Image: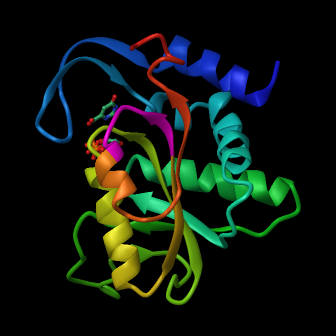
Amino acid sequence: MSDRERLLDEIKNKGIVHGRVVLSSGKEADWYVDLRRITLDGVAAPLVGRVMLDLTEDLDYEAVGGLTLGADPVATSMLHAAAARGRTLDAFVVRKAGKAHGLQRRIEGPDVAGRRVLAVEDTTTTGGSVLTAVEALREAGAQVVGIATIVHRGGDEALAATGVPYRSAYSLADLSLA
Ligand SMILES: O=P(O)(O)OC[C@H]1O[C@H](OP(=O)(O)OP(=O)(O)O)[C@H](O)[C@@H]1O
Ligand SMILES: O=C(O)c1cc(=O)[nH]c(=O)[nH]1
């Protein structure tokens, strides 16, 4: 079984929750893909790193990250998977809001200014969260070369408007949710 097939099984078995839920956008839905149960799972997280590296292998980037919290373990899994393959990949965290004390950084981690970066997410519904990260990265002087998410729920138009390649590892059809 490939990493992609194994991760799909993990998501189906551990990540899908049925029931009425309010989404990040304020919309309501009858099911939720809780990818934190995947990206923080000891078996699934290493697969996340390898699958997301494979998904974006044609893109040239030196750092990866996105809007906290969903994106954070995606980025660190990729960092470790890259290291296991002999490649150095930095990670970063985009805060939802700037911080008023300490160094007052909106983007934590090694500096992204002037660097080629990949914006990641665990799931995209409207694309709003990852677009917030893309805006913050561009403001900080990073060159966003692509966007990648584990599960694509929606947001196609907003994502296309960024003008950079967008990839998702799985569609709702893969999860038998569409
Ligand atoms: O495409 P969107 O409409 O923005 O929805 C997707 C976002 O929603 C979830 O995060 P949430 O806002 O629940 O916050 P969290 O990551 O802090 O848990 C998820 O992790 C994505 O970041
Ligand atoms: O839109 C969201 O907030 C959302 C949907 C989903 O399936 N999973 C998730 O973590 N967030």
Residue 40 visible from this viewpoint: no
Residue 86 visible from this viewpoint: yes
Q: Residue 87 vs residue 144: left or right?
A: right
Q: Residue 110 vs residue 46: left or right?
A: left
Quarter of the figure with the N terminus: top right
Span highlighted in magenta in the image? 149-156
Examine the structure image and report whether residue 158 is included in the region drawn in magenta: no
Examine the structure image and report whether residue 152 is included in the region drawn in magenta: yes
* Residue occupying image coordinates x 43% and y 35%: 152
Q: Is residue 127 above or below residue 116?
A: above
Q: Is residue 27 above or below residue 102?
A: above
Compare residues 150 and 178 and report the one nearer the observer: 178
* Residue occupying image coordinates x 63% and y 15%: 9
Q: Is residue 158 above or below residue 174?
A: below
Considering every residue shown, the one lying at the far right of the view is 86
Compare residues 172 and 34 and report the one nearer the observer: 172
Where on the image, by quarter, is ligand 2? Answer: top left
Q: Position of residue 127 (x, y in %)?
A: 31, 48
Q: Residue 93 vs residue 18: left or right?
A: right
